[in-house]
Image (cartoon, grey):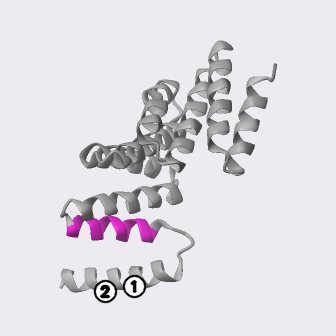
């Protein structure tokens, strides 16, 4: 019988190989094994890995079921980074299900925690996702501000993102006048 750490590694290898169904099985087995060993943090991490795998396959309900409750576990353990990551996964799951209000709330919580931790790239990704939600819900100005924040935090911008950032910089300067 493989150890919980071996199951985790097998799951990660399967995920990288885009064998998502098999990866989910390994992450689920690892979660159970870590929980049985009393390692709640690692068990919750494996549930987040299941969530990310389900998100890759657009299996929104399964993603939500996997991640549900993990932010609270990480909060109770004082692990803010994993809590923020779990909140972002929770947001993405709700977004996939079309639950924009819930998704936006969880993205905002993740943005705040990532900010406290100095996690610029993760925070930038959440701002960009939030911007998309805001745009869809008719909150154009908020969407522009969120996208601008995300682009300002990102270290490596694509050519398209650089152009968008320059345009947003100009537009926001004009609005301040």
Residue 143 in the magenta stretch? The answer is yes
What residue sits right under mark 2 in the picture? 170
The picture places residue 25, in percent across and down from the top left corner, at: 64, 31
As drawn, is 20 to the left or to the right of 64? right
What residue sits right under mark 1 in the picture? 166
Q: Is residue 47 above or below residue 138?
A: above
Instruction: Point out the image quarter for the N terminus.
Output: top right
Q: CA distance from mark 1 to mark 2?
A: 6 Å
Secondary structure mainly formed by the magenta segment:
helix
Mark 1 element type: helix
Residue drawn at the location 35% of the way across and 85% of the way down: 167
The picture places residue 107, in percent across and down from the top left corner, at: 36, 49
Residue 45 in the magenta stretch? The answer is no
Residue drawn at the location 44% of the way across and 30% of the way down: 65
The picture places residue 49, in percent across and down from the top left corner, at: 59, 38
The residue carrying pointer 2 sits among few (fewer than 14), some (14 to 19) or many (20 or more) residues within 10 Å by Cα, namely few
As drawn, is 138 to the left or to the right of 150? left
The picture places residue 114, in percent across and down from the top left corner, at: 46, 49
Of residue 137 and residue 130, the one placed in the foreground of this image is 137
Of residue 29 and residue 75, the one placed in the foreground of this image is 29
C-beta proximity under 8 Å, tags 1 and 2: yes
Of residue 3 and residue 161, the one placed in the foreground of this image is 3
As drawn, is 25 to the left or to the right of 135? right
Magenta stretch bounds = 140-152
The residue carrying pointer 1 sits among few (fewer than 14), some (14 to 19) or many (20 or more) residues within 10 Å by Cα, namely few
Instruction: Point out the image quarter for the C terminus.
Output: bottom left
Residue drawn at the location 28% of the way across and 71% of the way down: 144
Q: Is residue 49 above or below residue 1?
A: below
Q: Is residue 113 above or below residue 173?
A: above
Residue drawn at the location 62% of the way across and 17% of the way down: 35
């Amino acid at each position: 019988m493989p150890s919980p750490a071996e199951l985790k590694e097998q799951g990660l290898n399967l995920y990288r190989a885009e064998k998502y169904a098999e990866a989910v099985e390994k992450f689920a087995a690892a979660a159970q094994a870590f929980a049985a060993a009393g390692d709640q943090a690692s068990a919750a991490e494996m549930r987040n890995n299941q969530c990310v795998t389900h998100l890759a396959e657009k299996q929104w309900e399964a993603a939500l079921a996997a991640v549900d409750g993990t932010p609270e576990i990480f909060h109770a353990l004082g692990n803010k980074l994993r809590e923020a990551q779990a909140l972002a996964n929770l947001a993405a799951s709700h977004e996939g299900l079309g639950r924009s209000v819930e998704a936006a709330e969880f993205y905002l919580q993740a943005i705040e925690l990532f900010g406290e931790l100095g996690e610029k790239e993760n925070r930038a990704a959440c701002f960009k996702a939030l911007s998309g939600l805001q745009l869809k819900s008719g909150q154009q100005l908020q969407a522009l501000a969120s996208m601008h924040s995300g682009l300002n935090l990102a270290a490596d911008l694509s050519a398209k993102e650089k152009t968008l950032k320059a345009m947003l910089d100009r537009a926001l300067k004009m609005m301040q006048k």
